[in-house]
């Protein structure tokens, strides 16, 4: 059974230290406090979800993803950020999830710092990637949540367009958000999406699809 | 506010580069357009008010000319934005 000792000034810090060593999330572990003092707390963290843990270790390691994960983990360590980096399974392109406590600063204003982290990651891993291949970095599922949100906005806009027949212009969005909308609506036979304006004020327009011919 | 215009222009250049890297699939951005956006930044005298901003912008422009990957150009522009912020020009 995998276990690790964690030390920190607080209980949370001690648990986080052990979780980082184990590369596990809180829901998969049992936490035992060994000592708790005003200056230092020591905990023993043991992995309890062995099925999930063994499934993960049995999965064939993706070399590129592991290289990228290691590089981002090292980069964050140099930045003094205590966080776990995991490879999201079953995604193409390779997606790295960064999780931890108080990572708002790593996301930044409108995801700016997160986007910068992704650029640095792709530059560092670049020589291991094929042409056109990219690594996506997500912090606390921020990107995933934004994609989900804009897809919902797209669906609402599509419903309104079908009811009124009028085109709707959405708020300015980042490229990955616009892409999520175009992909969400590309299969809809009644509406179409396009973009207008210049970066960074480029906006998606959802309108009725004109009949062919 | 001093530095605000420079930050806006650098962010515009970053958005153009990210648009190429992320491939939203709804516009064609040419290297010439990115280079123009970076030159727009270099035209502002306020980029000299903080150390290294002009240097990083120059490197980004060189990277575009050399056909470096979009992520490399973006990283260099983020460095320029960071230098501007560290220079105390922005909150």
Image: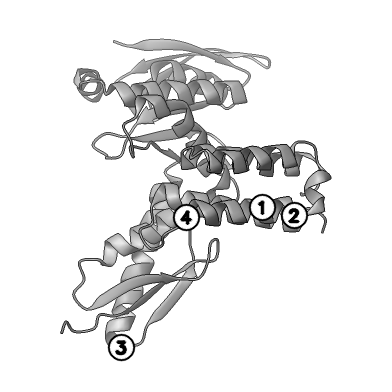
- Quadrant position of residue A190: bottom left
Label 2: few (<14), some (14–19) or many (≥20) C-alpha neighbours in 10 Å: few
Residue farthest toward the left in the current orientation of the protein: A213
Name the chain under label 2: B
Q: Earlier in the sequence, mark 4 or mark 2?
A: 4
Mark 1: secondary structure: helix
Residue situated in front as seen by the camera: A128 or B29: B29
Distance CA(mark 3)–CA(mark 4): 34 Å
- Quadrant position of residue B50: top right
Distance CA(mark 3)–CA(mark 2): 45 Å
Distance CA(mark 3)–CA(mark 1): 42 Å
Mark 4: secondary structure: loop
Q: Earlier in the sequence, mark 1 or mark 4?
A: 4
Q: Are marks 3 and 1 in contact (CB under 8 Å)?
A: no
Quadrant (top left/top right/bottom left/bottom right) for the N terminus of chain A: top left
Q: Nearer the viewer, mark 3 or mark 4?
A: 4
Residue B39 is tagged as 1
Total count of labels: 4
Residue situated in front as seen by the camera: B90 or A46: B90
- Residue position marked by numbered label 2 in the rendering: B43
User: Which residue is found at the position 53% from the left and 62% from the top?
Assistant: A199
Q: Nearer the viewer, mark 3 or mark 2?
A: 2
- The picture places residue A96, in percent across and down from the top left corner, at 39, 34
Q: Is residue B79 above or below residue A67?
A: below
Residue A165 is tagged as 3
- The picture places residue A151, in percent across and down from the top left corner, at 34, 62
- The picture places residue A179, in percent across and down from the top left corner, at 36, 58
Q: Are marks 2 and 1 in contact (CB under 8 Å)?
A: yes
- Residue position marked by numbered label 4 in the rendering: B30
Residue at mark 3 shares a chain with residue at mark 2: no
Distance CA(mark 4)–CA(mark 2): 20 Å
Residue at mark 2 shares a chain with residue at mark 1: yes
């Amino acid at each position: 059974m995998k276990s690790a000792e964690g030390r920190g000034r607080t209980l949370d810090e001690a648990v986080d230290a052990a979780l980082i060593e184990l590369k596990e999330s809180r829901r998969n572990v049992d936490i035992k406090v060994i000592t708790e003092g005003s200056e230092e707390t020591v905990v023993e963290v043991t992995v309890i979800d062995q099925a999930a843990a063994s499934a993960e270790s049995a999965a064939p390691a993706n070399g590129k993803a592991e290289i990228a994960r290691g590089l981002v983990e090292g980069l964050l360590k140099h930045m003094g950020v205590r966080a776990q980096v995991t490879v999201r399974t079953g995604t193409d392109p390779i997606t790295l999830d960064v999780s931890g406590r108080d990572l708002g600063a790593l996301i930044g204003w409108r995801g700016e710092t997160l986007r910068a982290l992704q650029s640095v990651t792709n530059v560092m891993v670049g020589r291991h990637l094929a042409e056109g291949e990219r690594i996506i970095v997500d912090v606390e599922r921020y990107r995933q949540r934004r994609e989900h949100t804009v897809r919902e906005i797209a669906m609402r806009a599509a419903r309104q367009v079908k009811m009124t027949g009028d085109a709707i212009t959405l708020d300015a969005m980042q490229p990955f958000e616009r892409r999520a909308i175009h992909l969400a609506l590309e299969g809809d036979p009644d509406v179409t999406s396009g973009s207008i304006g210049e970066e960074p004020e480029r906006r998606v327009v959802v309108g009725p699809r004109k009949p062919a011919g | 506010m001093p530095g605000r215009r420079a930050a806006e222009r650098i962010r515009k250049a970053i958005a153009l580069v990210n648009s190429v890297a992320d491939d939203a699939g709804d516009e064609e951005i040419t290297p010439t357009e990115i280079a123009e956006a970076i030159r727009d930044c270099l035209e502002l005298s306020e980029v000299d008010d903080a150390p290294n901003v002009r240097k990083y912008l120059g490197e980004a422009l060189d990277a575009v000319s050399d056909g470096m990957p979009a992520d490399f150009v973006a990283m260099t522009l983020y460095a320029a934005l960071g230098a501007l912020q560290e220079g105390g020009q922005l909150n």
